[in-house]
Structure formats: C-alpha cells, structure tokens
Image: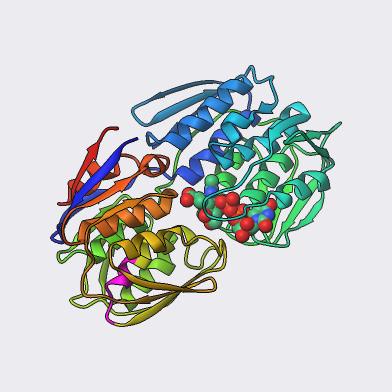
Amino acid sequence: MDKFIIEPNRNLSGDIHVSGAKNAILPAMAACLLAPGKSILHNVPDLIDLKTMAHLLRVIGARIEYENGIMSIDSKDVCYPEAPYELVSKMRASIYVLGPLLARLGKARVSFPGGCAIGTRPVDLHLKAMEALGAKINIDHGYINAQTEGLTGADIHFEKSSVGATINALMAAVLAHGTTNLYNAAMEPEVDSTIDILNKMGAKISGKSTTTLCIKGVDDLFPVQMDMIPDRIEAGTFLIAAALSTQPVRVCNCTADHLTALLDKLRESGCELEIESNKIRLYPAKRIKTTNILTLPYPGFPTDLQAQFTVLMSLADGISYVEDTIFPDRFMHVAELNRLQADITMQRNIACIKGVKKLNGAEVMATDLRASAALVLAGMVAEGSTTVSRIYHIDRGYDKIEQKLNSIGAKIRREKG
Ligand code: EPZ
C-alpha cells in the first residue's frame, strides 16, 4: 500500500488547479444509462472512484473509454441490471445505478451498501423514493431487488435532505409516466449538475437550486456532451492548505459561489480573499483566529471539509468547536491529529479544538477520503517528518494530490508499497 512521506513547508505560493467534481461525475456517469448511445463527459479526473463506477457500468453493458480527461460512455447495449457486492462494497455511490436501471430496464438488483468509515449511511430514502414511483422492492441475501411494470410520477417528501436520494429520484422520475414533485430536495451543486445533464438529455426538470423540484416525465432521452463542474471540495481543501501557509496562493478553476460557507469561515479566521472569475487568491492570516463549524446541507458548511478545517483550527489562537450534523461519527481523523500533538477532545459528537503553537510529525493512518486530506494538510505544517499510510483512500477522490500540492511548494513524496 502506498504511503506519503511529508516534510514541512509553510511557504506555499503560486497557482494550484482544481479538477472536475467527483461527486458530480459519478451521477453523470449513471445518468448516461438513461440515454441510449454515446455520451461524452469532459473535465473528468483520473480517480479510483470513477474507475470503479466505469467498471460497474461495463458490467451492466456500457462501453467506456477514457483519455486525457474525456470519458465516453456508450449505453446502447445496457442489458444486465445488477450492481454486484464486489463493486458496491468498494464504493457506495454504486447505488446511483438503481434509479436509471429501473427507469430504463424496469428492474435492478443492487447489493445493499454496508458499513462505512464515516458512520452509518442508510439508503432508506432512496428506496422510499423508488417505491413512491411505483417500484416493488424486496431485500434478499444482501441485495436490493427492485422491479416495476413502469414508473409513475409521484409527490415525494424527503424526511431528510439527501444528495444521493434526490439524485436517484431525479434519475428514476425523468422517464416516469406523469409528473413527480420532490420536496425537501438537496440543493448541492452536484444535484444542480445532475439536473443540467438530464435536462440537456431532454428531461424536463424545473426548480433547480431550490428544495422543490418538478419533473415532467418524457418518453426518451438522448446522449449529450457535458463539461463537468469543478470540485468544490478539492478547491476547499487547497484553500485550507493556503490558509495554513505564510504566503498567498491562488486556487484556479473553481466556483466561488459553491464555496460561500467555507469562504466566510476562512475570512472569520483572519484570511483575506480576492475573487476573480473562476480563481480565488487567499492571503493567509498572521495569526489564525478561532471560529466554530456546524456542518449542514448546502449552502451550509460541507461535512466533506470539516476534517480539513479542523487542522486549521488546531493551530488557531484559542478554542473552537466543530460539530458534524450530517455524519455525527465522522471524526476518525481526531485521534490521528492528536498523534501529531493537536489538542482535540470529543464531547459527544462535537470536537473541541484547543489551538496549539505547532504540530509534530509522526506516523498516521488515513481512514477515509477527507480524513486523509486532513492528515496531508497537517503533515505539510507539522515539524519533522509525517508518514501517512493507507493513502488509497485519497486516490479515490483527489487526482495526483501530491503533484498538485508540490507545485505550490509542498514536500510530499509517494512511497510505493
Ligand atoms: C454525498 O453522500 C457525498 N457522496 C458525500 O461525499 C457527502 O459527504 C454527502 O453527500 C453529504 O454532502 C457522493 O456524492 C458520492 P446524503 P450521500 O444522502 O449522498 C442521511 C466524499 O467524501 N441519509 O446527502 O450518501 C445520511 O445518513 C463523500 O466525497 C439517510 O438517513 O449523503 C446523512 O446523515 C463522503 N437515508 C444525510 O442523510 C438515506 O437513504 C445526508 O446524506 C440517505 C441519507
């Protein structure tokens, strides 16, 4: 298993470039199942999770090619409606094939996603939405078996805001007979991006960027070409790296409007920001001020950036609190950061972070994608050498993170293992 060996350097400077958004590309790939023929996605980074989704789509019968950030997906011959355990256990987003398979083939058999390093992650809202649209669902031997004679539009009220359930419901409803209304739908930019690709394919979805979406079912969808949006979480991770630096850094190819909650918190912590079209230049604070974080559905502070922000607060001037309301158990990074001599205690599901003068390098272990990113950021500022093992987690969602960070002055070496 590969490791990162990281030597400190807080003098980062220059430009760093953001790739396409993994969490927008995963549903876009699944959406291609709905439009028989060859769709082409642009701005697609080379990520393990996207390879896993490509593998799954091939199992289902799609033909996929990938070169230089361009992915083509030919879904003409899709015929095998199964997402096997082997792939779903690697990546929960495999559940995204449920809606499209039901809509296109009238049936789907998807392995029930199991446990996850960031806590319990049920799929009940996905299943309730499919049932509301007329699917019959039963669970047997660890598989979700869904079947329908034809989906029919319905009113669906989500009990909780869920990115995945909103997207799955959209992908099922676009080909359903009649009108579907989704209430308390998620508003994340990745949901908007899914609406954009579906509408480009010929779907009729209105209400984008609101919590109420209306989908008028159509008979057919057509293949498209689509540019994928920049990854707001990668951009946010780089902005936090910049906030930990002593010199200004410019994060390029990002959408500031998708990062409002983070940008507010970075300003509160003393950073100055200059926003110009799709670039954000961050001037770090001389002394990092404390600020509290409460993760919430978009446009609130994203759960996917709380671990990285915790690193910044570990070096702040005083005490701050981080509470994750989306995934209350998503604090595996805390014990690892304390190995680097951060001073963080957990009070129920709230991290209480006492700022320290410096972190000290040590051996730490990555536990999930964003926790790994946090450990890399911590290693970049900790005195002495830090080794982050199990970095396959980071390769799932960050394209060549060490090369990108090294291009602005970080000292990260990948040791193959
Ligand atoms: C998406 O996961 C992202 N994954 C996650 O990013 C992200 O952390 C999360 O949204 C929240 O923003 C992808 O886009 C592939 P949810 P998702 O359904 O869709 C509860 C990363 O690091 N819930 O919005 O699975 C759930 O437990 C990953 O890139 C139910 O109760 O998240 C959570 O508390 C990790 N029942 C809340 O809703 C359900 O059926 C929101 O989860 C579904 C969700």
- Residues 315 and 203: in front is 315
Q: How is the image coloured?
A: rainbow
Q: Position of residue 403 (x, y in %)?
A: 23, 41
Q: Position of residue 53 (x, y in %)?
A: 53, 32
Query: Residue at position x 21%, y 78% from top?
Result: 287
Query: Residue at position x 64%, y 39% from top?
Result: 95
Q: Is residue 284 above or below residue 35?
A: below
Among the 4 quarters of the image, the one containing residue 210: bottom right
Query: Residue at position x 28%, y 62% from top?
Result: 340
Q: Horizontally, is 97 left or right of 347 in the view?
A: right
**Residue 125 shows in this picture:** yes
Quadrant of image for the C terminus: top left
- Residues 98 and 118: in front is 118
Q: Disc count in the image? A: 0
- Residues 131 and 389: in front is 389
Q: Horizontally, is 83 left or right of 404 in the view?
A: right
The segment highlighted magenta reads: 311-317
Q: Position of residue 152 (x, y in %)?
A: 83, 41
Q: Is residue 192 above or below residue 161?
A: above
* Residue 314 among magenta residues: yes
Q: Position of residue 337 (x, y in %)?
A: 34, 62
Q: Residue furthest top?
A: 77
Query: Residue at position x 14%, y 57% from top?
Result: 9
